[in-house]
Amino acid sequence: MTDTRSTAWDTYSQSKPQRRKTNANGETTWFNWTQYPDHGPGVDVLRLAPGDSVLDLGCGSGGNAAHLAAIGMRAVGVDLSARQLDKARERWPGMDGMELHQADALAHLKDAVTVFDAVYSVFGAAWFTDPGLLLPAVHANLKPGGVFAFSQRPPVEGCYGCQASYIPRGPDEDPAVVKRWDYEPAAWELILKEQGYADVSASVISPPPGSRRTGTLFVRGSRDHGPEGHLVLRRTVRAPAGGVPHHSVHLNPTSPDAVTFTRSGRLSTRVPHPPEE
């Protein structure tokens, strides 16, 4: 894969710390939503049962997907970085129930022949993909009642929509730049609802006690149990403060119309280290 984003994430993987051998409970596999070890909700928020199929968008070195496979799910991990996937295969060789693919998240969703019981992203592709494209693609690949959940850092106040993050390279090289999408929880709730998701919730998980001050944005929605497909619905919505001022939404996942978000503010930041993978 020659995608420049793939090269950028390969570079990032060189500075990414490795997942611990065991967590605080002595377990060799576990699921982590936040950037802090042994903190935050568990896998139960995905409403999975043994034998269910689940897709990890931006799986990195595979820790969360490996845990799901270890407890009986069929876990599919997708990542742009070949180096991250190599780490996953080295750490979890021959893990039954886990398969890994190097691919762009949108391209994989477009080509997928499986509909999933859940799709999730932990500081992964959901953060770095235009939600106007990703949300309908995920929705189309969820079974009725299936859950989509993702976590990332909360936005910086006043900086919403498409933002720039950079990945340092060599001392004489310009940093690699990747795009990310940031909104306040209330705006995320609005966006998911307008894309046809039900049971939508979004909040910031408080950090653990101590000097850390940055929480974790956690967003969750599900595909309704109603009939498949959507009528195309177009409307202009006024979002709450700290979100998208106006946007036009098309709810048909197969519609060629793209969702356009107006942007209020810009902020370029270094890509933070996500949770242990």
Image: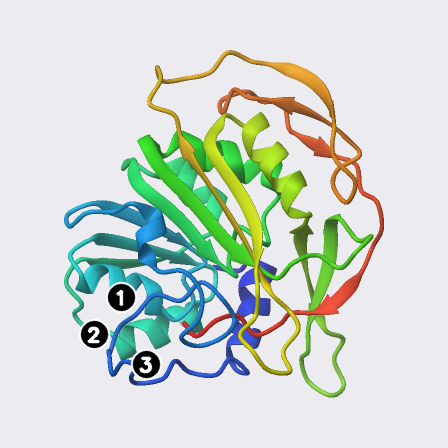
Which residue is pictured at 65% across the width and 24% down the height?
249
Q: Is residue 208 left or right of residue 95?
A: right
Which residue is pictured at 37% across the width and 40% down the height?
147
Q: Position of residue 42 (x, y in %)?
A: 35, 60
Q: Is residue 62 above or below residue 188?
A: below
Q: Position of residue 96 (x, y in %)?
A: 14, 63
Q: Which residue is mark 3?
A: 23
Q: Is residue 95 left or right of residue 116?
A: left
Under mark 3, the amino acid is Asn
Under mark 1, the amino acid is Ala
Q: Which residue is mark 1?
A: 66
Quarter of the view holding residue 60: bottom left
Task: Quadrant for the C terminus, please.
Answer: bottom left
- 19 or 22, which is in the foreground? 22
Q: Comparing marks 1 and 2, which lies closer to the viewer?
A: 1
- 87 or 184, which is in the foreground? 184
Q: Is residue 273 left or right of residue 267?
A: left
Under mark 2, the amino acid is Pro
Q: Secondary structure beneath disc 2?
A: loop
State how many labels appear: 3
Q: Which residue is mark 2?
A: 93
Q: Secondary structure beneath disc 3?
A: loop
